[in-house]
């Protein structure tokens, strides 16, 4: 039997909320460990000599914080993107 393909519907209803998704338990359980591992590696590579020498300034600690924030944001964006793609697929 040859069945005609049904026309694709546009997604109905709002997509998943950004902040609600990013700060959900499922997202944090995946993104925080990624941030800890990658942030530690970046901090050791980029600021390790200053930290181990004991000459870290406030600017150094801001850089270390950014080393953790960036992988958290990247992994959270990936998590949200995958949830949004699942939403689109479900609403086809």
Image (cartoon, grey):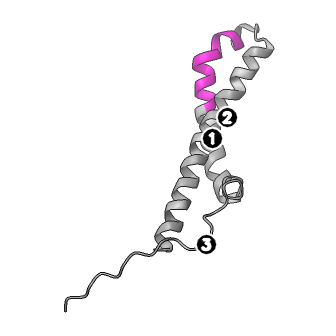
Position of residue 48 relative to residue 35, above or below, is above
Q: CA distance from mark 2 to mark 3?
A: 31 Å
Residue farthest toward the right in the current orientation of the protein = 58
The residue that label 2 is drawn on is 69
Picture coordinates of residue 88, whole percent (x, y): 50, 67
Q: Are marks 2 and 1 in contact (CB under 8 Å)?
A: yes
Question: Which dot, 2 or 3, sits closer to the camera?
Answer: 3
The residue that label 1 is drawn on is 73
Q: Residue at x 76, y 7 (%)?
A: 55
Picture coordinates of residue 37, whole percent (x, y): 60, 36
Q: Residue at x 76, y 9 (%)?
A: 54
Q: Which residues are magenta?
A: 39-51
Residue farthest toward the bottom in the current orientation of the protein = 1
Instruction: Pick the residue in front: 29 or 88.
Output: 88
Quadrant into which the N terminus falls: bottom left
The residue that label 3 is drawn on is 13
């Amino acid at each position: 039997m040859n069945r005609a393909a049904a026309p694709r519907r546009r997604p109905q209803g709002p997509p998943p909320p950004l902040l609600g998704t990013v700060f959900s338990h499922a997202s944090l359980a995946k993104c925080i460990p990624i941030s800890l591992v990658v942030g530690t590696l970046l901090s050791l590579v980029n600021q390790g000599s200053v930290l181990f020498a004991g000459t870290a300034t406030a600017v150094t600690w801001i850089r270390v914080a950014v080393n953790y924030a960036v992988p958290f944001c990247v992994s959270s964006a990936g998590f949200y993107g995958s949830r949004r793609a699942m939403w689109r697929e479900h609403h086809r």
